[in-house]
Image (cartoon, helix red, strand yellow):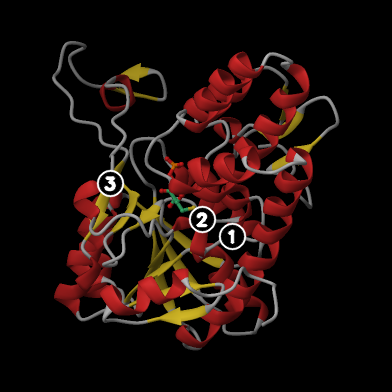
Amino acid sequence: MSTPPTELIAVAWDGDAVTYLDQRRLPHEVRHERARTVEEIEAAIKTLAVRGAPAIGVFGAYGVALLRDAIADDEHFALAARRVRDARPTAVNLAWAVDRVLAAEDMLAEAQAIHREQISMDKAMSEAGLALIPKNARILTHCNTGPIATAGGGTALGVIVAAQRAGKKPHVFVDETRPLLQGARLTYFELRQAGVDATLQVDGAAAIAMQRKQIDLVIVGADRIARNGDTANKIGTYGLAVLAAHHGIPFYVAAPRSTFDFSMRSGDEIHIEERAPEEVTAFGGTPVAPPDAKVYNPAFDVTPGHLVTAFVTEYGVIEPPYPETIPSLELRPRFGVLT
Ligand code: MRU
């Protein structure tokens, strides 16, 4: 394994390109790439080279600003922006960020503002979540929600790292997160970089971990949250929420306001991305199932809002009843703007 650098830059503006960390290569190789065309931007998102709801929002925002400069014809530009916006369907942050940039007069300035805001929102979120983490907490998490997933300080993982910095000494049980192993490859890697004690487990070990390992809480991120608190997140999250309820363990979701989709009344309306069967029939490129096996490979599931103990946002902790507390979030002034 290469020596971990002190700082991994998830996404950055580079004048004539958008630079990104190729997350597919972690933890073995830290390599940054440059995307300059709509094809390169779209491919980076679709292949999960750039992934994580807020990070694809920031990347898409810079991407559209870049394409505006490169494509003079308005119709061609609109088509290119649409390709970026639609590259992945479930995380609302991508469409939200692209729409925000498209509505701005200075697209690059707007993309930079989205990036800056993400960094300060992540910081506020981690501070808000700190109160939920007891000293020496044993925490279970799923997928990857760290700095590389947000282009800031992270959502759920940001809260965990804040707890570590506050001297709370959390211990994290990390689901490997099949089929693409974001937990094993990325979360374990980022926790180690942050000096957080962690144990890796297969996804199927979550139940016995809750039964026998004194798990105090579960905290995950989100890709889209409906007005009633129904939460789309990485496949396997819903099962964790059911298990947590069974074991009487709090289940928290950390997400910025940009991940809430106030237009959706419930999670039934959320479009769940289905990915290629090969992600399931092969492991690290080696076939593990008959090549013609029928496969169901949803990238996300929807946790019913009633299973979420609380949401951690940049505006503070939000508790039930969600059909009342979440819509009031929409009315809050833009983050960082004082009333
Ligand atoms: O398919 P991915 O890896 O982009 O899925 C990411 C997740 O599900 C994360 O948990 C979510 O985006 C929250 S990230 C801060």
Quarter of the figure that contains the N terminus: top right
Q: Where is residue 224 in the image (x, y as percent from the top left)?
A: 38, 53
Name the disc covering residue 154, or none. Answer: 1
Look at the numbered disc 1 and give the secondary structure of its residue. Answer: loop
Assess disc 1: are there few (<14), some (14-19) or many (≥20) residues with their C-alpha within 10 Å of its C-alpha: many
Position of residue 179 in the picture relative to residue 303 (left or right): right
Name the residue tied to disc 3. 270
Indicate the amino acid at tag 2: Thr
Which residue type carries mark 1?
A: Gly
Looking at the image, which residue is at 45% across and 84% down? 132
Residue 42: x, y in percent? 55, 23
Q: In this view, does 262 lie to the left or right of 266?
A: right
Q: Marks 3 and 2: CB-CB under 8 Å?
A: no
Nearer to me, 138 or 155: 155
Q: In which quarter of the image is residue 162?
A: bottom right
Question: Is the residue at mark 2 in contact range of ligand 1, meaning its CB lies under 8 Å from it?
Answer: yes
* Three-letter residue code for mark 3: Ile
Name the front one of labels 3 and 2.
3
Query: Label 1 near label 2: C-beta < 8 Å?
Result: yes
Within-10-Å neighbours for mark 3: few <14, some 14–19, many 20+: many
Q: In this view, does 60 lie above or below 240?
A: above
Q: Distance between the residues labelled 3 and 2?
A: 20 Å
| Figure quadrant of residue 289 | top left
In front of the other: 315 or 9: 315
Q: Is residue 272 in view from this perspective?
A: yes
Of marks 1 and 3, the one in the foreground: 3
Q: Earlier in the sequence, mark 2 or mark 1?
A: 2
Identify the residue shown where x is 64% and y is 84%.
167
Q: Label 2, label 1: how many angstroms apart (C-alpha)?
A: 6 Å
The residue carrying mark 2 is 145
Sequence-wise, the earlier of marks 3 and 2 is 2
Residue in the image at 28% along x and 30% along y: 274
